[in-house]
Image (cartoon, rainbow, N blue to C red):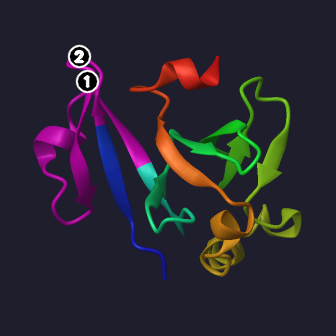
Amino acid sequence: MREIKFKVWDKEKKCMVGIFNLQNLSFKFKSNKNYLYLQYSGLKDKNGKEVYEGDLLKTGCGKYLEVVFYNGKFVLCDKDYKKRIEWAKEEYKDNEFLLFQALSSIPNLCDNLHLSVVGNKFENPDLLK
């Protein structure tokens, strides 16, 4: 089962505050509108680094893709957001339980695509240009 946790981006200070799971995410974070919560995908890149929503991944051929939670699933989007590579099978889109199982059952996807986390869209926006 995938661990539920979040990276927290401070919109005012423009920095990551930390990584929190549901148990240690304090009320001050939950109620603060200056924070953006970036969910852990449950996957790791080819180097074993955890992949979060908003992360930028570099493909083996040098292309940069952003991790986006879209329509109930994590997808990789190119800089124009036109081409989407789904991390879950299309037939699971309407079933949250099966979608979760599908996401959890493909831990080597990043390794198979030779993807590595190289930053995130907040700290490294230049990579999306």
Residue 16 part of the magenta-drawn span: yes
Crowding at label 1, few (<14), some or many (≥20) Cα neighbours within 10 Å? few
Badge 1 marks a residue whose secondary structure is: loop
- Quadrant of the drawing holding the C terminus: top right
Q: Position of residue 23 (x, y in %)?
A: 19, 66
Answer above or below: position of 53 versus 94: above
Badge 2 marks a residue whose secondary structure is: loop
**Residue plotted at (77% across, 23% down):** 80
Residue 91 part of the magenta-drawn span: no
Q: Which residue is mark 2?
A: 12
**Sequence-first disc among 1 and 2:** 2
Kindly identify the amino acid type of the residue bearing the numbered disc 1.
Asn
Magenta residue span: 9-38
Q: Position of residue 127 (x, y in %)?
A: 57, 25
Q: Position of residue 48 (x, y in %)?
A: 46, 68
**Residue plotted at (29% across, 41% down):** 8
Tell me if label 1 and label 2 are in contact, CB under 8 Å: yes
Q: Which residue is mark 1?
A: 34
Camera-side residue: 123 or 95? 123
**Residue plotted at (75% across, 33% down):** 78
